[in-house]
Image (spheres, grey):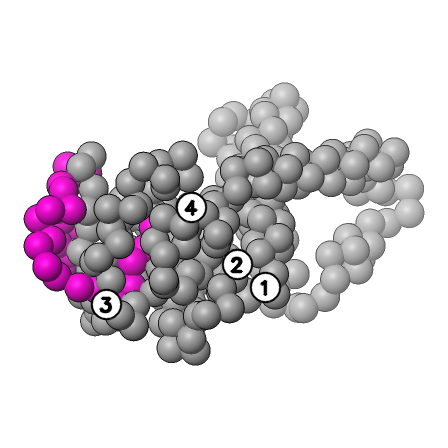
Amino acid sequence: MKTLLVGCGKMGGALLSQWMRATEDEYTIVDPFLDQPVDGARLFKDINALGAEKFDLLIVAIKPQMIDEILPAYKDVLADTGAVASIAAGCSVARLQSALPGYPVIRIMPNLPSAIGAGVAGLYASGDAKDEHKSAVETLMKSAGTAVWVDDEDQIDRVTAVAGSGPGYVFELARAYIEAAKDLGFSEDQATDLVLGTLDGSIRMILQTGDKPENLRNSVTSKNGTTEAGLKALNGDGKLSDLLKATTEAAYKRAIELR
């Protein structure tokens, strides 16, 4: 398959690295701001360098604000049986098809851990997308982690709020947790090792046991013990639950605004 990436920023580059490890497809990038070519992929600074070449899949990897200005120039680079896939957060199928009419669109909402093959991506396909289009994109995204299909376009914006933006929430939680450990007298290195090791082990335990987080939480919480005291301070009044709900709702609202 011949794949063209329009833009190749941090997320596009992270995904491309995983795709190139997992497939033997041919990858081409058009990005005027990318200085170093990705090993194994062709890099052009301008669309005109493509000549009359046709591609099977066009990956939109530019910022949503650039869609209307840049994408229409690519209307002739896709093969007749080609498709468009977009990682532009919040950019609707209708907007993409307005810029590139006549082609099916698959929206992809990846997240940053895709860079290490541990990502989670939501996928949504327009009604005219064929099975071979969906299969090709699913294969790409599974090479970078987990891929989850959703039934309607609104859900892809909800995926954005939960998984797409989610690593930012986790990184901020880890930062605050490390600072709290330092306030108890640990050095930066000690606090980092203690906190990240605890987070890593706890998540692995959920995944490997398949048990519910609340069951595992209860198993480590003795009545009137240290964990119970900490949990009461953390979420005894429900404020943490309310805060996380507000966090995802704010991200979802912003995704809607970007449509």
Is 122 in the magenta? no
Q: Is residue 137 left or right of residue 174?
A: left
- Image location of residue 70, percent across then percent down: 29, 40
Mark 1, other Cα within 10 Å: few <14 / some 14–19 / many ≥20: some
User: What's the mark number on residue 79?
Assistant: 3
The residues colored magenta run: 34-60
Task: Name the N-terminal-most of marks 2 and 1.
Answer: 2
- Mark carried by residue 122: 2
* Foreground label between 3 and 2: 3
**If you read the primary sequence from the N terminus, does the residue marked by circle 3 or circle 1 appear first?**
3
Image quadrant containing the N terminus: bottom left
- Whether residue 54 is in magenta: the answer is yes
Q: Which mark is residue 88?
A: 4
Evaluate if marks 3 and 1 touch, with contact meaning CB atoms under 8 Å apart.
no
| Callout 3 touching callout 2 (CB < 8 Å) | no
Contact between labelled residues 1 and 2, with CB atoms less than 8 Å apart: yes
Disc on res. 150: 1
Q: Amino acid at mark 3?
A: Ala
- The percent coordinates of residue 61 (x first, y second) are 34, 47
Evaluate whether residue 20 shows in this view.
no
The residue under the point 13% across, 41% down is 45
